[in-house]
Image: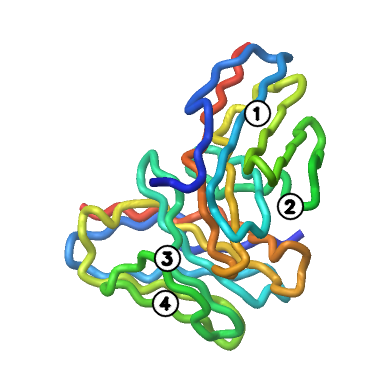
């Protein structure tokens, strides 16, 4: 079965650079979520989109922005990168009409800021 | 303060043995509770999901229980295998923050031969 796809899987950037992370949800899933997981920490919710509209917002820095496109894929744009942005970034998708609104997670993008 | 508390923080068990992980939560209004397995550097994989009306749910050698009155859940792993070594995360969602999940810190399980 198709899973959530994230790209790239690994990314290395310098401080103050920008980065774009992409997420391709499971087909027919209409909601996408972004999470940030620092070393040894639990995932922190950043932002979610339902039908291309922002549905909920968590602890996403102002330097970050995200959007969901007409084909339901989502991109997380990160600017003025800081060392503390180094983390695993997970995307999850769900089908709101599905049981429990269960979220399926992608493999993550590991971002390293030098 | 984390609204989802897990114990123990870490656990070492011998292959073939059973173990039980605990999760206490204060999140409300409660919608559902999930147990995820996360291998290092990988995305969490769902094991079980339960609503308040479900007391127990199994997925192979994994059995989760839920007591919505005491706001406690457990995950029992039967006949552990080396591949069970991972972090097990208890996650709770609420009815008023649609889709936003509250994560526990996880229990790191190490299965040794």
Relative vertical location of residue A70 with respect to residue A7 in this rendering, above or below: below
Render colour scheme: rainbow
Residue ID for mark 4: A66
Residue at 52 percent of width and 79 percent of height: A55
Residue A33 picture location, percent across and down = 53, 67
- Which structural element holds mark 2? loop
Viewer-nearest of labels 3 and 4? Answer: 3
Mark 2 surroundings within 10 Å by alpha-carbon count, few (fewer than 14), some (14 through 19), many (20 or more): some
Circles 3 and 4, Cβ within 8 Å, touching? The answer is: yes
Relative vertical location of residue A106 with respect to residue A64 in this rendering, above or below: above
Relative to B89, B32 lies left or right: right
Residue ID for mark 1: B84
Viewer-nearest of labels 4 and 2? Answer: 2
| Real-space CA distance between mark 4 and mark 2, rounded to the nearest whole angstrom | 33 Å
Are the residues under marks 1 and 3 on the same chain? no
| Real-space CA distance between mark 3 and mark 2, rounded to the nearest whole angstrom | 26 Å
| Real-space CA distance between mark 1 and mark 2, rounded to the nearest whole angstrom | 27 Å
- Which structural element holds mark 3? strand
Relative vertical location of residue A111 with respect to residue B105 in this rendering, above or below: below
Which chain is home to disc 3?
A
Q: Which sits in the foreground, B90 or A110?
A: B90
Residue B52 circle label: 2
| Real-space CA distance between mark 3 and mark 4, rounded to the nearest whole angstrom | 10 Å
The quadrant of the rendering that contains the C terminus of chain B is top right
Are the residues under marks 3 and 2 on the same chain? no
Circles 1 and 2, Cβ within 8 Å, touching? The answer is: no
Q: Of marks 3 and 4, which one's residue comes earlier in the chain?
A: 3
| Real-space CA distance between mark 4 and mark 1, rounded to the nearest whole angstrom | 35 Å
Which chain is home to disc 4?
A
- Which structural element holds mark 1? helix
């Amino acid at each position: 079965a198709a899973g959530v796809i994230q790209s790239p899987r690994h990314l290395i950037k310098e401080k103050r650079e920008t980065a774009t992370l992409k997420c391709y949800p499971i087909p027919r899933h209409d909601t996408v979520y972004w999470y940030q997981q620092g070393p040894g920490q639990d995932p922190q919710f950043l932002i979610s989109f339902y039908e291309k509209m922002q549905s909920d917002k968590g602890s996403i820095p102002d330097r970050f922005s995200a959007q969901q496109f007409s084909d339901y894929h989502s991109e997380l744009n990160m600017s003025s990168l800081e060392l503390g942005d180094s983390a695993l970034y997970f995307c999850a998708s769900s089908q709101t009409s599905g049981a429990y609104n269960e979220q399926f997670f992608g493999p993550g993008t590991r971002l390293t800021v030098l | 303060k984390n609204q989802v508390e897990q114990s123990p923080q870490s656990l070492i068990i011998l292959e073939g043995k059973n173990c039980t992980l605990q999760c206490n939560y204060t999140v409300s209004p409660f919608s559902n509770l999930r147990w995820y397995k996360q291998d290092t550097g990988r995305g969490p994989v769902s094991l079980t999901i339960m609503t308040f009306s479900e007391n127990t749910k199994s997925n192979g050698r994994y059995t989760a229980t839920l007591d919505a009155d005491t706001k406690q859940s457990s995950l029992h792993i039967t006949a552990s295998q080396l591949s069970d070594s991972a972090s097990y995360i208890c996650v709770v969602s609420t009815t008023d923050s649609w889709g936003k999940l509250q994560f526990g810190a996880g229990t790191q399980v190490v299965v040794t031969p």
